[in-house]
Image (spheres, rainbow, N blue to C red):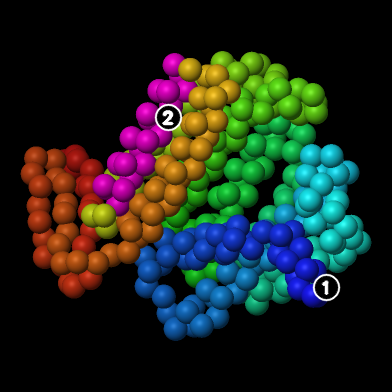
Amino acid sequence: MKKMQKTVAILRLIRPINCVIMGLAVFVGMIVATRGQFSEATMIIRIPLGFVTGFTFLGAANTVNDYHDRNIDKVNEPNRPIPSGAVSPKEALGYAAVLSVIGFLAAFFTRDANLAVAIIAWFLFVYYATKGKRTGILGNLIVSVCTAIPFIYGGLAVEKELSPLLILFASMAFSSTVGREVTKGIVDVHGDQLQGVKTVAVLYGPKNAAKMAETFYIIAVALSILPLLMSPVSVWYLPLVTLADIGFLASTASLARNHSRDNARRVKNLARVWMVIGLLAFVAGSLLFGEWKLTFKTSRIDFQKTPPYEFFFAVDAPQCY
């Protein structure tokens, strides 16, 4: 019985559902980088290794975060594993160390570039958990970088160079996350003031924080248009990314009209929905399937028959002679 309770406590500490999502984010990076055309070696070796690194690193980050916040959690969250006594602080550090080692080993056996990215990611999450959370905008930027890193990591696991499509996707993830984190600062402004957290909302007021969040949401929307101009993408990219863009623009307009805490909370929650839809858009856009290629020329739209399982949408820039 005690072993079962300890296991449950450890799982609560690392938050396995979030860890699975992080592992899947690495996999998405691989899909975007290769257009879903995986070699046998990638299927057998690199996909599992990438998933393991994403899973274990987030588990380690969550554990370090709870270790550092253990005294605060005694008051705010006394039922969490460490303050409740289910896991001792020393045990928590041990689990974080084991998870980190597993993640580094998986990165080592993937590629040198992946190991380098893993080292950077590890230092970022440790800094954020120990000091970065209280720095406000710097903390927002660190979280946003950590949101984009899994996709970059996945891309480097299967390709030597990052494709423009993957860089765009990571940039969109970064921009939308900055917007969401700044919006979250509006929601938490009173508590952050008491804790001395220097968010944009605390330093410059909710109105200016709302303007900054709106700017980053609009940047994310603008970036989502570029794949149509730069690289062939599946025709299914367009409806999904359009839905995400409409959602972001509607949320931006809502925040511009009303930057109250209640509305900021609603926009923050909706932003996650639009981010997930954007994620699905890039996955769908990277998988080439079907039988027709849609190409926009300067004065006409051409339909060209392509080999099976290549159904994509491309925009050709105007030709100058």
User: In the drawing, what numbered circle is on residue 294?
Assistant: none
Q: Residue at x 33, y 45 (%)?
A: 241
**Secondary element at image label 1:** helix
Residue 283 is situated, as x and y percent measured from the top left of the image, at: 38, 58
Q: Which residue is drawn at 83% across and 73% down?
A: 2
Say which amino acid is labelled 2.
Ser
Secondary structure of residue under mark 2: helix
Region in magenta: 237-257
Task: Give x and y (percent) for residue 75.
Answer: 84, 39
Residue 235 within the magenta-colored segment of the rendering: no
Residue 226, percent from left and from top? 35, 43
Which residue is drawn at the image coordinates 43% and 26% (left, top)? 252
Q: Which disc is residue 2 wearing? A: 1
Q: Which residue is drawn at 13% across and 41% down?
A: 298
Q: Mark 2 points at which residue?
A: 251
Q: Position of residue 168 (x, y in %)?
A: 44, 47
* Placement of 8 over or under 295, stated as above or below: below
* Above/below status of 136 relative to 290: above
Asked if residue 6 lies left or right of residue 114, the reply is: right
Q: Quick one: label 1, few (<14), some, or many (20+) residues within 10 Å?
A: few
Question: Is 87 left, or right, of 178 in this rendering?
Answer: right
Of helix, strand and loop, which mostly describes the magenta segment?
A: helix
Rendered view: 249 above or below 161:
above
Identify the image quadrant of residue 245.
top left
Label located before the other in sequence (1 or 2): 1
**Structural distance between the alpha carbons of marks 1 and 2:** 47 Å
Q: How crowded is mark 2: few (under 14 residues within 10 Å), some or many (20 or more)?
A: many
